[in-house]
Image (tube, helix red, strand yellow):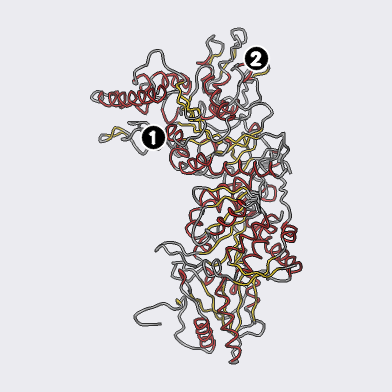
Amino acid sequence: MAGYNLKDVMSRPERLAPGHRMCAGCGATIGVRAVLRALHEGDRAVIGNATGCLEVSSFMYPYTAWEDSYIHNAFENAGATLSGAETAYRALKKRGRLPEDENYKFITFGGDGGTYDIGFQSLSGAMERGHDMVYVCYDNGAYMNTGIQRSSATPRFADTTTTPVGSASNGKLQSRKDLSAIIAEHNVPYVAQTTFTRDFKDIHVKSEKAIYTEGAAFLNVLAPCPRGWRYETSELMKICQLAIDTCYWPMFEVDHGSWRLTYEPKTKLPIEDFLREQGRFKHLFKPGNEDLIVQFQEEVDRRWEDLLYRCNR
Amino acid sequence: MRTDISNINEQSPCEDLTEGLMIFAGGTSKDFKTGEWRVDTPVFDKEKCKQCLLCAPVCPDGCIPVHDGKREDFDMDHCKGCGICEKACPFGAIRME
Amino acid sequence: MSRKDRMSGNEAVAYAIRQVNPDVMPAFPITPSTEIPQLVSTYIANGEMDTEFIPVESEHSSMSAAVGAEAAGARSMTATSSCGLALMWEELLVAASNRLPVVLTLVNRTLSGPININCDHSDSMGARDTGWIQIYAENNQEAYDNFIQAFPIAEDERVHLPVMVCQDGFITSHAVQNILLEEDSDVKEFVGEYHPEEYLLNPGRPIAVGPYAVSNYSMEAKYNQEAAMIRSKEVIKEVAAKFREKFGRGFDLFEEYRCEDADYIMLIMGSASGCAKQAADELRQQGVKAGVLKLRVFRPFPAEEIASALSKCKAVAVMDRCESYNGHGGPLSCEVPAALFMNGINTKVINYVYGLAGRDFTVSNAAEVFGELKDAAGGGQNIRQCRYVGLRTREGQ
């Protein structure tokens, strides 16, 4: 794999065209652009997509934002749908209906609703069968397309429209499902968790590995949603940096079973720094709720220690 | 049978719609001008720009065209004015107005 | 040259799948269709075919993967029954609305509950408005023949719709009967090679499948889908004629058994047609002019043709192997009278529900129904609509 050069990768042709209807400042399409830039020039792609914001905004008839072939099927089956397309590729190659020198890569995108929840079985099946594809979850921690309902990726205490904060409620009761670890336990060759960093090197390198590692790969990309998280659209990169510096969203990869931390903050910041920026956690800063932040911090610490153990064993 | 979307609009007769509403083309969304949504507008100061390109990947809409390692002015047809690029620029070469 | 053999319906369909050798087949086991993916897997394991088989984790994923594979340019099919079909419901609609010529071989089994593995038509009947062409078989021979015709119908450019080929669970799928099998080369020639015009894996010609569409487009798109379903009727007849010319057997929309001069006609689908025909034969010997209209194609619904075929008789028994839970009769019992009415035909109709969840439907059951038709036509009283054949009640029937 060649060294990373931002100027080179940014000079590649865009594979996601502008004109899609995602909200201003949306993290999902930043993630899509970053992943698709890792495709080598000359390689073609079939893009899959679970129903969600990205799908209804990027292929609103007759406007497709995708320069490559694209298929949206339904909400809960992006894994199975792309596994069918990938199998078709092998069948057509085998039967001489595609030229030998044509290379297709299979990449599917789903939000955390389509990935962690309703599409979990379909994803698990596709990963276990080992199709040569990449499943990319753009994790914004709630069902944003239907109006910010909680998902199993929603952090504890978040204020969502199905876990609203009220006089008898402090938001979501449960903590997040660790999907990256669950998929790693499928023994697929490559799993990584990432988000957007200043030079986008981390997501680029991981995307390239995911796409060009033979077999099933899974990328979990933290993709902030300004509407759902309630912050100013311009603050996206700051939010991402705080997510990784507080160890709320650790950056790691599992390459053929080997766990590796890909970013370790010089100073681990307190979780308040991440929470304070977002309206969905506003209630945690009310007098009397100090204990909730302590609980949040304890969970972040516990998960971080667990990850360090996995990476150092 | 390639699709020319300029022949398809919300008043098209059924015979003019594509089979299964598939689009036999890529990137047709460029014809939809999301720039109309914009409230704040980024202004590019070419003099201050050092061509570090840290602004280009942060755009959700791919509105900072890069050719041969150099960025050009914004694609105002599509920029939605989110302002992420302004914050990403270390040199103050982007200002939201 | 045709070859005589003995096979079950599942074996016959699996044999046809081997001959067609489709590009991709995702499938998940469910009784009574399980043997089909098993037999296909065995053919593949023995090098007798080289279809890419995907052992998916559910029927929802089997139809999802078939949609993905078909859109990608591969001739794709799957097999299922009952709850498996119910689980893929949403995907049936997606396959049809995306105009993908997927073929599904369905072995009819009742839907839960109670869980029961035997035959009725509630699975495919529940899917009757999903935009799939539906073709029903009376026996293993027709299951084999219908499967071979499915791809040329689905892939015809006037159609581009998925096709469901149905046979009755256990009664047809597991009973071993005589069959005429065709040469591999003849079957391959009949089905032809698959070369779609537009598909995902067409280098330099990307496509986008499955949009969000606003109301201004969606209604026209749905009409276009219906227009394809209407056009498919002619294609089904053409393919049946071609099949008959090449292999010397088969029917197009339905079979009219001794209907020409019949006073009493039983309209029925699937394996029970055999008992109906036997009863008609026996009644004919007693001087009763009985006939059987065996519906082969339920979607598209051949309303005009049925009305015409039933226009001269005195009374018709419409037989549903399915309950609609609507207080108004099963699917055929609603659609056949509507077809008669819309075409100005005033033939008397009596509706029956029979054979639910594998309940036997015998020659004597069929003869009783014909007897009731005769009473009804003669002005007989107490002929109840929507009666269950062979139902136990305290009063009796």
Q: Which mark is residue A177?
A: 1
Q: Helix, strand or loop at disc 1? A: loop
Find residue A176 and report its image quarter: top left
The image quarter in which residue A226 lies:
top left
The numbered disc on residue A296 is none
Image coords of residue A246 (percent x, y): 38, 20
Instruction: Tell me where residue A205 appears, x and y as whole percent.
Output: 55, 22
Q: Which residue is mark 2?
A: B70
Q: Who's the residue at 58% across and 19% down the image?
A: B56
Crowd band around label 2 with a 10 angstrom C-alpha radius: few (<14), some (14–19), many (20+): some
Q: Is residue A40 visible?
A: yes
Amino acid type at circle 2 is Lys
Residue situated in front as seen by the camera: A61 or B71: B71
Q: Residue B97, can we see it? A: no
Q: Chain of mark 1?
A: A
Q: Is residue A116 left or right of residue A206?
A: left
Quarter of the figure with the N terminus of chain A: top right
Q: Chain of mark 2?
A: B
Q: Is residue C128 above or below residue B38?
A: below
Residue A122 place in picture, x, y as percent: 49, 43
Mark 2 element type: strand
The vertical placement of C361 against C119, above or below, is below
Q: Residue furthest front?
A: C46
